[in-house]
Amino acid sequence: MSFSSLVNDLSFKDKPSAASEQRRQMARGSSVSTFDDGRSHLSRARSYASTSATSVSISGDIASQLHGGYSHPLARSWQAERQLTKSMLIYPLFITDNDDEDTPIPSLPGQNRRGINKIVPHLEPLVRKGLRSVILFGVPLEPNVKDALGTAADDPKGPVIASIRLIKQRFPQLFIVADVCLCEYTSHGHCGILRDDGSLNNELSVDRISDVAIAYAQAGAHSVAPSDMNDGRIRAIKLKLIEAGIAHRVLLMSYAAKFSGCLYGPFRDAAGSVPSFGDRKCYQLPPGGRGLARRAIERDISEGADIIMVKPASQYLDIISDAKDIGKNMPIAAYQVSGEYAMIHAGAKAGVFDLKTMAFESTEGILRAGATIVISYFTPDFLDWLES
Ligand SMILES: [Zn+2]
């Protein structure tokens, strides 16, 4: 059917109400006539066709016409409040105390555990492609290196401190975040120092965690990011940074809303941080705890956090949005965790969707929710994808 015959067809079918007919008459500047006039059908059909196609081609008003606003790829990108850029990405690195190690992590496709000798060759091409930031996780593999206090966490020769110094020297433009926790270094695998009954001793844990944070900051980390979830650790770290005279140059990124759950499995494989007993449900947040997350975010902001992080990301978009709402004046980071990354890879491998398309879609969802920083294992891929 041609457009003009469609118009005619629609016009003859049209049985306007008195009010709409009156509006049309007024719009045409004519005086109001009797709308059930015998000639009206024919004359209406002519005038619809000749005056305005939109009055018959759409049933709603002008505001219903949206397609023109995103018909071009560039116009589509303008619809996003925040567009993914390379500088939003932080790339997680697992660094072992076995200097020459370079071992793929089976549950994290494309990710390796690396010794310090393998870090620079790995980072060189990524920095050339625009990598701006890394977050470091130490993975002690030496026998007997773990104890009840996580002593190895701030060993000056340990993998994290040694790699902070090395990366800073070789890639001075790279922003180094050091994850701060004890679980990789404690014999029991929990994120602090324990009481006899197996629960976290908050006071001793905070004291120890804040010491470790200061050691990383003094080694040259631009940011320390405590992931332990002990109460009061943000305040303790901030005070020690001030005391050490380095608060002005160290960014404190809080894993404020870190939820317990099953999405950390591949990370625990990678970092060797599976608890030897129990779980972390008494210090990480329960998945349904939105109000509790809001309180944790408010607390960490009041204790001096410079950036609030939500972890995991895609299952907690409402929490990211809450964090943006509560922390209106600060950057919000989201950690797309190992399980999210592994699921996307598994889905793509099973033919459910295209890997790149889903990597973008999931990350854009995280940004749309309110994050301005994304910690992502897809970072090396994005450095290529954002180029093309
Ligand atoms: Zn931990």
Image (cartoon, helix red, strand yellow):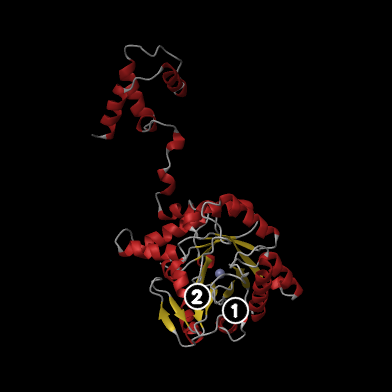
Number of numbered callouts drawn: 2
Q: Up-down: is 308 above or below 154?
A: above
Q: Residue at x 55, y 55 (%)?
A: 320
Please indicate, yes or no, whether residue 324 appears anywhere in the rendered image. Answer: no
What's the residue type where badge 1 is placed?
Ala
Q: Quadrant of the C terminus?
A: bottom left
Question: x and y percent of residue 202 in the render?
Answer: 66, 66
What's the residue type where badge 2 is placed?
Leu
Q: Residue at x 37, y 20 (%)?
A: 16
Please indicate, yes or no, whether residue 323 appears anywhere in the rendered image. Answer: yes
Q: Quadrant of residue 353?
A: bottom left
Q: Which mark is residue 234?
A: none
For this orientation, the residue located farthest to the left is: 1
Question: x and y percent of residue 181 in the render?
Answer: 59, 72
Lower position in the chain sequence, tag 2 or tag 1: 2
Q: Residues within 10 Å of mark 1 (few under 14, many from 20)?
A: many
Q: Nearer the viewer, mark 2 or mark 1?
A: 1
Q: CA distance from mark 2 to mark 1?
A: 16 Å
Question: x and y percent of residue 41 in the render?
Answer: 32, 18
Q: Quadrant of residue 159?
A: bottom right
Q: Up-down: is 205 above or below 23?
A: below
Circle 1 is placed at which residue position? 153
Q: Relative to residue 355, is residue 227 drawn left or right? A: right
Q: Residues within 10 Å of mark 2 (few under 14, many from 20)?
A: many
Q: Quadrant of the N terminus?
A: top left
Q: Quadrant of ligand 1?
A: bottom right
Circle 2 is placed at which residue position? 93
Q: Residue at x 48, y 77 (%)?
A: 128
Instruction: Judge by depth and name the residue closer to the eye, 326 or 211.
Output: 211
Q: Up-down: is 49 above or below 299?
A: above
Instruction: Judge by depth and name the residue closer to the eye, 178 or 174.
Output: 178
